[in-house]
Image (spheres, helix red, strand yellow):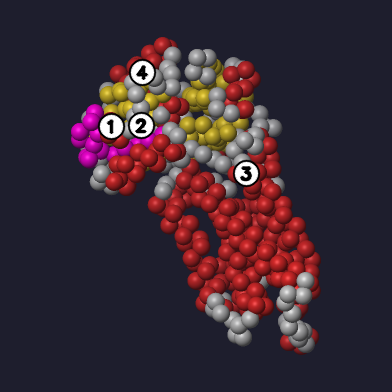
Amino acid sequence: MNPIRYAFLAALLVPTALWLLADGFFPEPLNTFTFRSAFLQYTGIVGIGAMSMAMLLALRPKWLEPWLDGLDKMYRLHKWLGVTGLVFSVVHWWWAQGTKWMVGWGWLTRPPRRPPGAGELGAVEAWLRSQRGLAETIGEWAFYAAVVLIVLALVRRFPYHLFARTHKLLAVVYLALAWHSLVLARATYWSQPVGWLLAVLLAGGSVAAIWSLAGRIGARRRVGGTIVELDYHEQMRVLEVLIVLDEGWPGHAAGQFAFATSDRREGAHPYTIASAWDPATRRIRFIAKALGDHTSRLHRRLKAGMRVSVEGPYGCFDFNDAQPRQIWIGAGIGITPFVARMKQLAATPEERPVDLFHPTREISPEVSAKLAGDVAGARVRLHLMVDGQDGPLDGERIRAVVPEWRSASLWFCGPAAFGRALRADFIARGLPAACFHQELFEMR
């Protein structure tokens, strides 16, 4: 989490510092209207800057993964930036509209404005000023649309397929807000670092918005495939899907994930890959648990022979570290990346000892047998804990089972709150933060 925290702070502090360098926080003379003018510029710059960076992250730039610890972390940063953009936009809107309302109510008296002479403005600045009224109107309505769309994105009960469609509309809203920002930014900014940064962000965000509207996100990393096998475990409501990919898949590491599309109307969904890569067979396996409306229908809708599209691979949850031992915690469907890693270890063994903790609500005999086979092939020590039989899993129990935990790295996949609790517990007892790896498998 630290890389995205640092990136988030930089996304706030760098524009703030450059704005202060250009304007200062206390304008001369200091009164309600001069402060309003400066504060509108500040909130606008930070707000559109955060939205621009969120748009760029929406492109799923693979080259950023090593710097931000994987696309799952990048999506968390994307969410933070989107919420930050919304908060700054609300404050920006209030200072813009609230002051006008207070003037209308007679609470404030606006000082007289002295319009500049025609000779004082360059052609570009004069044209931008002529667009101010239109830009203010477009910005206001785009702000209302952004509030609705971002709030919908944050509501977990809002169906995923509707979220995917409505969230794409934010690209249109962003282009309107970018135009609003370009027109209403102070002309003096464009010759200073704050303006250079704003120009880069507006240009990058606009290109990203157009790329998104054209449906080109991830297009170069998409490969077609055919479903060859389906195995539904009704007791656990878990579906295994085996796909043979067409030529072009670059290969993947155990622990990575991909976006799979079986219905264009539904859009792409992320799934952790549950198989090691063999270029000779080009087979890839996904395991999906019925947790929502889409995954609950998959076992009825998917058929052998159906064509699908797979995009990826993504993620840095790759078990790559220098610790002499590893502890894996795969809670529920979070066992998936560890299944892929065990299949990889069966083909290319390692001497490093591994303890796998798998707390789950239930497990069918068939799945239990498959897991036992994977564990035996990878020479991993399994600790299976079924709810109602074996009690809850916590840090104290893990440390009791693995006394050498201080020399281990921990790899967690499962409910985010459970992972946060384990991380805090182990770090409080001396485990270096860099030794706790958690996949944040939440894309909204």
Secondary structure, mark 3, is helix
Q: Which of marks 4 and 3 is in front?
A: 4
Q: Residue at x 44, y 38 (%)?
A: 417
Q: Nearer the viewer, mark 4 or mark 2?
A: 4
Q: Residue at x 71, y 67 (%)?
A: 98
Amino acid type, label 1: Ile
Instruction: Read off the residue under disc 3.
Output: 153
The answer for how far apart the CA atoms under marks 2 and 1 are is 9 Å
The answer for how far apart the CA atoms under marks 1 and 3 are is 36 Å
In the picture, residue 137 is in which quadrant?
Answer: bottom right
Residue 92 % position (x, y): 65, 65
Q: Which of marks 4 and 3 is nearer the N terminus?
A: 3
Asked whether residue 190 is in view, the answer is no
Q: Earlier in the sequence, mark 4 or mark 2?
A: 2
Instruction: Read off the residue under disc 4.
Output: 389
As drawn, the label of residue 398 is 1
Amino acid type, label 3: Ala
The answer for how far apart the CA atoms under marks 3 and 2 are is 29 Å
Q: Nearer the viewer, mark 2 or mark 1?
A: 1
The answer for how far apart the CA atoms under marks 4 and 3 are is 38 Å
Q: Is residue 276 left or right of residue 402?
A: right
The answer for how far apart the CA atoms under marks 4 and 2 are is 18 Å
Secondary structure, mark 4, is loop
- The residue furthest top is 365
